[in-house]
Image (cartoon, rainbow, N blue to C red):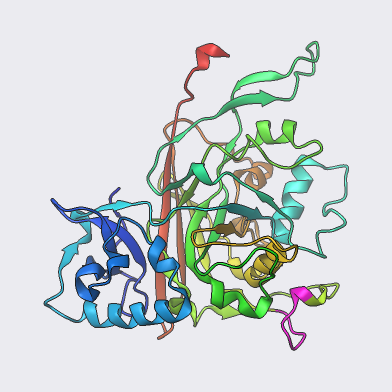
Amino acid sequence: MRDRQGPEGFGADHLPYGVFSPPGGGPRVGVRYADRVVDLAAATGLPALATGSLDALLALGPSGWAQVREQAALAVADAGVPAYDVATVALHAPFTVGDYVDFYASEHHARNAAAVLRPDAPALPPAWRHLPIGYHGRAQTVVPSGTPVVRPVGQGRPPADGDGTPAFGPTRRLDLEAELGFVVGAGSALGERVAVDAFADHVFGVVGLNDWSARDLQGWEMAPLGPFLGKSFATSVSLWVTPLAALTGAWTDLPGQDPTPLPYLRSADGSTPRGLDVAVEVVLDGEVLSRPPYASTYWAPAQMLAHLTVNGASVRPGDLFASGTISGPGEDQLGSLLEMSTHGRGFLEDGQEVVLRYSAPGPAGGRITLGEVRGRVQPARHVGDT
């Protein structure tokens, strides 16, 4: 894959990690600095960085992450360290996804989606304000930005004028979902919980994420269980992983939670953990459709991880959990076409390209640019088999 992002927002206060191959060379770990990719394996001599994956770096844990970041900051200022124009290198999937969990943490999205899908039912399930609702997704179909998205085929609701036989064929309601993904580094043991206050001990960084959705497949199969084939065909993530250390200036208070969550979803002092001020931009074929604010979300990322592990489920390096669709209160802040459909927007057509862009306040002032997520829709395959 090639990087199409400009150098703005990739300064020394950011330094996101990725896996790249220089011209004529094999894959290795690097950091993005302006319009260059700096070879961290050459700069540090660490075997963990001379591989085609961030996996070994993720497993180092917080102290190892801090040391590598210090070395990265020195490397970008050292003219003797190999660096390559970002336009000349090939970028690869940054890490091996272990498990993938997607949450449903935006109240605005939950209410908007319910108004479309379940207009005669309560907007929020009874548990929604008590716990971060999520589902276990398919790790093998998490793909790097730029990977084409093939229109999925599957079952939908039976036609109203038919004999009750389900519809079958390519989805007619292919959707995007603008989300933020969290990459687990240090793991936990089976049977242990990860406390809210231990979030930074386990989470390495964030990626942009598009949770592609086939709404007609999803609507038919989600009775009574959760998403399955309507979601599992593709989830796109950015090629660059922004470390938490680059987001120290982005933490912000959440809008508020009522009722007060149970103790395991609060900090040790009883306070609510903070969210992130990440601005998202949804672009379709070059047209900006919306600008959802992640700061408007209801559940904090630390609460999502705490709930994911409260039953003793373990996490490991490379696990990925996502925010769920990010939507704000305004019509220009919607994170999915499902929500925009109430304002006349249709679903995705073959050949269209979706780009999700992200930015956040940087630790030194100004803004950093997170890795974008691209995906172009390709026609369904095996349509004749339907």
Quarter location, residue 228 = top right
Residue at the (42%, 32%) spot, across then down: 351
Q: Where's residue 212, x and y in %? A: 55, 43
Q: Where's residue 187, x and y in %? A: 55, 67
| Viewer-closest of 357 and 78 | 78
Q: Where's residue 190, x and y in %? A: 66, 63
Residue at the (63%, 53%) spot, across then down: 102
- Residue with the most extreme bottom position: 269
Q: Is residue 176 magenta?
A: no
Q: Is residue 329 left or right of residue 41?
A: right
Q: Is residue 353 left or right of residue 137?
A: left
Region of the chain picked out in magenta, as a range:
264-272
Q: Is residue 288 above or below residue 353?
A: below
Residue at the (80%, 59%) spot, across then down: 128
Q: Is residue 149 above or below residue 287?
A: above
Q: Is residue 336 above or below residue 38?
A: above
Q: Is residue 319 left or right of residue 312?
A: left
Q: Quadrant of the C terminus?
A: top right
Residue 180 visible to an observer of this rendering? yes
Secondary structure mostly seen in magenta is loop
Quarter location, residue 155 = top right
